Every structure is written in structure tokens, then in C-alpha cells.
Image: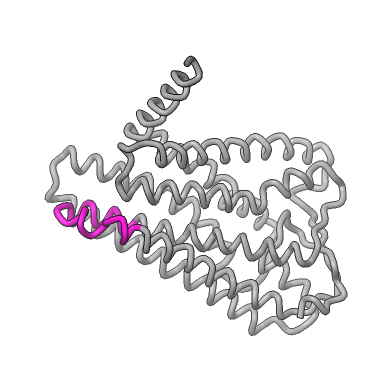
Amino acid sequence: MAAASNVTEIIFLGLSQSQHVQKVIFVVFLLMYTAIVLGNGLIVVTVMASKGLSSPMYFFLSYLSFVEVCYCSVTAPKLIFDSLFKRKVISLQGCITQIFFLHFFGGTEIFLLTVMAYDRYVAICKPLHYVTIMNRRVCGLLVGAAWSGGLLHSAGQTFLIFQLPFCGPNIINHYFCDVHPVLKLACSDTFLISLLVIINGGSISVISFAVLLVSYVVILRSLRSHTAEGRHRARSTCASHLAVVGLFFIPCSFVYMRPCITLPVDKVVAVFYTVVTPLLNPVIYSFRNTEVKNAMRRLVGRKVTWEEK
């Protein structure tokens, strides 16, 4: 068991060993994390406060934005804090906890993106039955299923890691704890556990990505019978979703859908799915959306009016 290990703390090498580069990392990632919290937080507040954004698409978007903030918060604050110090350390229990929440929110995001693809499929391919199929109860169940799927995935990954003894060394060439770097620190045979880790993470990625692709192929084929304006709106919505899917799934697939080996480039790739995707989510999904922008203006207008009173 991990509790019986000789190792009590993990040392990160971080994104860079250079003190000058670490100062740049501190400033850049602090600004990016602030933008992620404010941008995604604004989407959540706007959807909750605006009666005009009551459709299932915006309901799912608000949850996706919330998950993005939580997902980024698992790694970014620690990276920002560690960039101020030469020695970057985390306890073994903290490391395992970080793995749990990283895969919990990451798995939930994957399932939410799949749910959002299903929502677009129903809206575009079965518009007359959309309100009946995607009622509030169904939407709530789909969101609950996404959270439950993320929890089961994360519990599986964490349980596998928790079985391993760690005797040293305790240095990870990364800026956060993840299954592949931590597996390299185990002082026992990890072949079977590595295989189970790949099956757990890889199967979710492959199945979800396949469902997403099939959904959008069906959607694009069905657009032939729509008006020009309808095709334009549907393609715009689908393009936004596919952009987020690509930004998240491609880096994740590179890291998790391969044998449990670590590469120096993994740190850079991880920045894309833990920081860049949450940063671009508000821009891709919402700030290009006229309804969301108008709702944000009304929300800000109400706040200004209330302050003047």
C-alpha cells in the first residue's frame, strides 16, 4: 500500500529549472489562471442569471465551464506557487489526491463533451422532438451521469496507484502528479497496473471520441435538408464544439493512449489540456455567441444600474 512506502514526498522538476524562466512562468500562468476563473465564472453566472439562456445547450455549457475551472485548479495554482521556489515538493498523499481530482474533473469533462454532442444531435436531427427528449429531468440525469462517470474513472485510476509501494527515487520530471510519471517511481512490477491504467483511460477516450465523431458525421449529413441560415448556425455551433474537442482530446490521447512511458514533451502537452483548453473555452463557445454576449451585456447593465441606486 502507498501508506507503507518509504517515500513520503514527491519532488517536481517543473517546466524549467531556470530561475529567470520560472519568473516568466509565474506571471504568464497567473494571468492565464485568472482569465480562466473570470471567463468561465462569468459564463456560469450569466447562464444562471439569464432567463433567455434556459436551453439545454447553455445548461450543459455552464457545467462545462464550472468543470473547466475545477480541472485547471487542480494543477495551475500549484504550478504558480512552485515557480516562486527552487524546491518544488508535494506529499505522497497530496500527490495521490491530485491524481484523483485530475482524473475526476478530466473524466467528467470528457463525458460532458459527449453529452453536449448528443444534445446538438437531437437539436439538429430531431428538432420537433427536441423539447420533449431534452427535458429538464433528462438534462439533469445526463449531467449526473457525466459526474458519476468521471468519479468511477478517477476512483479506478487512483485505486491502482494506491496499491503500489514507493521506495525511491522520488523525483518527477513534471509539474504535477499523474499516473504515468508516478508509476515510474514504484519499486515493484507495474506491467499489469500499467495495462489496466491504459485500458481505463484509453477506453474512455476512444469510445467518447468515436461517439463524438459519429454524432457530428450524422449531424453534417442531416444538414442537407436544412435552410441556408439553419446550416450556417448549425455549422457554427458544431465547429465551436469540435474545436474544444480537438484541443482537449488530441493532447490527452497523446499522453494516455500509449504505453506507460514518460517523454520530456509531456509537460508541454499537458499545458494544452490543463490550461489552454479551459482558457479558450469561453472564447470558442461563448464570446462568439451573440445570445451569450447579449446576456452578458444585460447582466453587466443590471449590475451598473443596481450600483447607481
Establish if 164 lies above or below 145.
Answer: below
Q: Nearer the viewer, residue 146 or 257?
A: 146
Q: How is the image coloured?
A: one colour
Q: Overall secondary structure of the magenta stretch?
A: helix
In the displayed image of the protein, which residue is found farthest to the top? Answer: 308
Question: Which residue appears at 52% of the width and 47% of the height?
Answer: 277
Residue 54 drawn at (x, y percent): 32, 44
Question: Which residue appears at 51% of the width and 48% of the height?
Answer: 66
Q: Nearer the viewer, residue 229 or 69?
A: 69
Q: Nearer the viewer, residue 267 or 229?
A: 229
Q: Is residue 41 magenta?
A: no
Residue 257 drawn at (x, y percent): 54, 69
The quadrant where residue 92 appears: bottom right
The quadrant where residue 188 appears: bottom right
Question: Which residue appears at 85% of the width and 71% of the height?
Answer: 7
Question: Which residue appears at 27% of the width and 45% of the height?
Answer: 235
Establish if 277 lies above or below 161.
Answer: above
Residue 53 drawn at (x, y percent): 33, 40
Establish if 134 lies above or below 40.
Answer: below
| The N terminus - image quarter | bottom right
Residue 51 drawn at (x, y percent): 32, 38
Q: Is residue 133 magenta?
A: yes
Left or right: residue 103 compared with residue 228: right
Q: What's the magenta region?
A: 117-139
